[in-house]
Amino acid sequence: MTRNLSDRSRELKRSAFAEFFAEAVEMQRSGEDVIHLHVGEPDLRTPDHIVEAAQLAMKEGFTHYTPPEGLFELREAIAEKLKRDNRIEVDPSSEVSVLSGGYNALYCAFQVLVNPGDEVIVPEPCLPQYWGDIGLAGGRAVPIRLVEEGQFRPDFEELKEKVNGKTKLILLNSPQNPTGSVLTREDMNHIADIAEGNDLMVLSDEVYEKFIYNGLGHTSFASIQGMKERTITINSLSKTYAMTGWRVGYVAAESELIAKIRSMSEHTVWCPNSIAQKAAMAALKGPQDCVREMVEEFRNRRDIITAGLNEIEGFTCSPPRGAFYAFPNVEETSLSSMELAQLLLREAQVAIVPGIAFGARGEGNLRFSFANSKKNIIEALERIRKVVKKMS
Ligand code: PLP
């Protein structure tokens, strides 16, 4: 009965993304040949050496609780990785916590940082979970525009304008979901000045860090001079090692925050999955050519999907610099992003995500994931081209 629900849970809504996903799955179940270009996970298998580490852990009986903050050896491997790849130096005993995926890490971080009434600046379009998590912590997400003509980088003037006495935190996500944008070091320096000048914290969601195609490389916000103390870095093994189902993520930040994040974890899941933690160690310490090969494959797919989308009437798409999403502008079709996504699902059997699912600033665009085979991407583009042609 509704009257039994907490006020907090009353506010929880099923996202437009979940709705869409359910419809695509239902169509597939009833025998339709749906091509899934809406999924936000690599289609490739988790590399064998990672799977084997998990098998060994199970065989050896490593199937019990671990400390809430995760295994020390895994935190050590994360600290080594952060130093090597991200130029962030952390103490594995007090400045890192392992969580059950990036989503869990985000939830715990917002709970620990945000007070009722606090404002969090969120570049939009963005992952819808940010608003939900901020709302659950009693805060308010304040959107700023990612500018399409500026390769979906933030409107820095708007960012400065939106900062006020209630602002607690700036959220960054580079490479970005859904636009595929990547912040440059200059962008980060700019944001660092704003954070410093207004005494703000920065939450940096870096789960797509390895998926960069423009040769710029990834800059971690905490590696910018003077920013380590202000930054909560969130990362995950999900995308880098095709491990979305294993649910291993982590947070790096100063020790006081990490102590509270560990308590949050303790009060929600106790600890991340023990077997998956062993697999994560194998991923971080093992050979990295599997990552390079995957990114190379995604680079090819990116080129195919960008070229194909630009051939569709009413679609314009600049090549994404990162992540594995293309975010074409479809305003010239004269349909809303939801209408067009529904039409393409029903008429072309291609599932994609309407831009509006990522916030009002996503309207006018569609998100295409290229985490699917080249064959399927080419077939999907052909089907869409035919359906859109019929419209004109
Ligand atoms: N952050 C971003 C920007 C994402 O797109 C996702 C997942 O799609 C996550 C975090 C969470 O991923 P996971 O919980 O699998 O680590």
Image: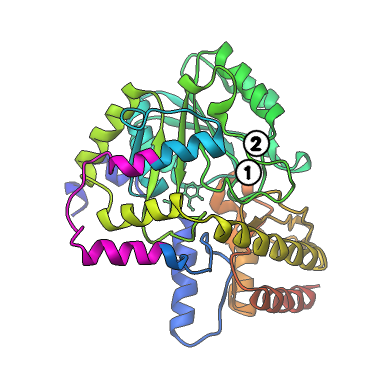
Disc assigned to residue 361: 1
Query: Residue 349, located in which quarter of the rendered image?
Result: bottom right
The structure residue drawn at horizontal position 28% and vertical position 58%, both measured from the top left corner, is 275
Secondary structure at badge 1 equals helix
Image quarter of the C terminus: bottom right
The structure residue drawn at horizontal position 70% and vertical position 34%, both measured from the top left corner, is 184
Query: Residue 153, located in which quarter of the rendered image?
Result: top right
Instruction: Check the image and name the residue furthest to the bottom.
Output: 31
Rendered position, 131 above or below 228: below
Ligand 1 neighbours mark 1 (CB distance < 8 Å):
no
Residue 280: image x %, image y %?
38, 53
Residue 4 seen in the figure: yes
Disc 1 to disc 2: CB gap under 8 Å: yes
Residue 385: image x %, image y %?
76, 74
Image quarter of the N terminus: bottom left
Q: Using a 10 Å C-alpha cutoff, classify the residue at mark 1 as few (fewer than 14 neighbours), some (14 to 19) or many (20 or more).
A: many
Q: Is 151 on the left or on the right of 46, as rendered?
A: right
Residue 101: image x %, image y %?
38, 49
User: Considering depth in this image, is 3 or 327 the residue closer to the camera?
Assistant: 327
Q: What stretch is highlighted in magenta?
A: 50-76
Q: Is 342 on the left or on the right of 55, as rendered?
A: right
Residue 328: image x %, image y %?
72, 56
User: Considering depth in this image, is 170 or 347 the residue closer to the camera?
Assistant: 170
The structure residue drawn at horizontal position 53% and vertical position 85%, both measured from the top left corner, is 32
Q: Mark 2 points at which residue?
A: 145
The amino acid at mark 1 is Arg
The amino acid at mark 2 is Arg
Residue 245: say if magenta: no
Separation of marks 1 and 2 at Cα, in angstroms:
7 Å
